[in-house]
Amino acid sequence: MNKGAEAIYDLGVIFFFSPLAYTSQQCMMNPVSHTEGVPMDLKTLKDSQLIAVYRKLREKRDEAKAEFVKAQAPGLKAMTDIEGELLRRMQQDGQNNVSCKGIGVAIRMTDVKIKVENQDEFFKFCLAEHSYEMLDIRAAKKPIEEYIEKHEELPPGLSVTREEYVNIRAPKGG
């Protein structure tokens, strides 16, 4: 077993976790499964073993994520404070960027967020002005699923993809 690795033993299955398997982006575990040191074939396990081990893996992943979030909190706060101070200085000096040769550049940005307050009013405006480019057309899942169920076909111009997956949950009350 790798130095610093941690093992989880559940229902005859041992999973090893190496701290080296964590990534800063995903903070995910890369489990290497073994039964008495021999790589395990998931097909040989009972459903109860697979579910129990999956839940343990998810628990360890969640713990690692929480530790990662906690560990990075002071650095994220410092970064936010630095961004705020640089923005304050650029606003005060009327600058759009600050460049430091060989170190980097800070660029003043503006993020615009637009919220539809009255959907009917906005839609009527777009139609009246022929400003269709202001609209973002998306298909609403629930009404379309209801349409398909009722008419046994898709509305024109759409396609649908269905993907099956497994959702593993803890038992009720546990």
Image (cartoon, rainbow, N blue to C red):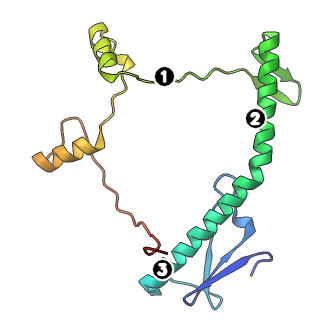
Choose top left, top right, bottom left or bottom right for residue 96. top right
Residue on which disc 3 sits: 50
Q: Position of residue 15 (x, y in %)?
A: 62, 80
Q: Categorize mark 2 by other alpha carbons within 10 Å: few (<14), some (14-19), many (20+).
A: few
Please say if the residues under marks 3 and 1 sit with CB atoms less than 8 Å apart.
no
In this view, the residue farthest toward the top is 129
The Cα atoms of the two marked residues, 3 and 1, are separated by 46 Å
Q: Position of residue 3 (x, y in %)?
A: 80, 77
- The kind of residue on which mark 2 rests is Thr
- The kind of residue on which mark 3 rests is Leu
In this rendering, position of residue 98 left or right of residue 32: right
Q: Nearer the viewer, mark 3 or mark 2?
A: 2
The label on residue 114 is 1
Q: Categorize mark 1 by other alpha carbons within 10 Å: few (<14), some (14-19), many (20+).
A: few
N-terminal label among 3 and 2: 3
- The kind of residue on which mark 1 rests is Ile
N-terminal label among 2 and 1: 2
Q: Quadrant of the N terminus?
A: bottom right
Q: Which residue occupies 63% across, 76% down?
A: 32
Pick the front one: 58 or 14 = 58
Residue on which disc 2 sits: 80
> Vertically, is 157 above or below 133?
below
> Vertically, is 50 above or below 138?
below
Is residue 169 at least partly visible in the picture?
A: yes
Is residue 152 at least partly visible in the picture?
A: no
Query: Tag 1, which secondary structure?
Result: loop
